[in-house]
Image (spheres, rainbow, N blue to C red):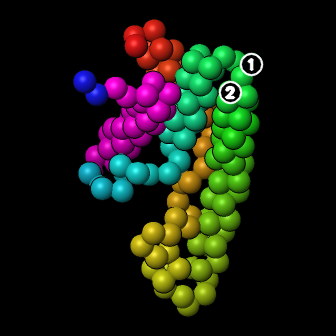
Amino acid sequence: MIVFPYVLTAALFAGVLSQFIKFVIKLSKKKKFQWHYLDAYGGMPSSHSAFLVALCTAVGLQEGFVSSAFGITFVISAIIIRDAFGLRMILEEQGKIILKLAKQVPVEIEELNGKNNQIGHRVGHTISEIIVGSLIGIVIAVGGYYLM
């Protein structure tokens, strides 16, 4: 019998589920399959938030909400989620400005926006995307806790 650790399973399942939901939403909007939709940054819901909140909730449920382990996961989760909202949104705005400037200069956009470069693309999250991702994380962690 294979036993999966509850905390890791809850976090991974929440992250994968929210990324799949994001993929379906993007696919329904664009009406065209693209492989990069599977690991897209930004968009509804935040898979980072789902993963981290599920991790934090699962640790709290298993180890206690006053444990050091919960405190550590809470602080790390808060920092990463804050970056997803603040820093990555700033990068997204700067990318849009860079693309506008690039159109005024004789530089090929493809050179500026290489294969893995996300300049001018959606990389940050809105508050609603973070909240929905967080709710997915809580539901998965609590549901998994009582089912296991």
| Residue marked by disc 2 | 70
Q: Residue at x 52, y 35 (%)?
A: 51
User: Is 16 left or right of 53, judged from the image as shown?
Assistant: left
Report if the CB atoms under discs 2 and 1 are less than 8 Å apart: yes
20 drawn magenta: yes
Q: Residues within 10 Å of mark 2 (few under 14, many from 20)?
A: many
Please identify the quadrant where the C terminus is shown.
top left
| Residue at the farthest top position | 146
Magenta residues span: 3-32
Q: Nearer the viewer, residue 145 or 143?
A: 145
The amino acid marked with disc number 2 is: Phe
| Residue marked by disc 1 | 66
The amino acid marked with disc number 1 is: Val
User: Is 77 left or right of 25, judged from the image as shown?
Assistant: right
Q: Residues within 10 Å of mark 1 (few under 14, many from 20)?
A: few
Q: Residue at x 54, y 54 (%)?
A: 122
Question: SS for tag 2?
Answer: helix
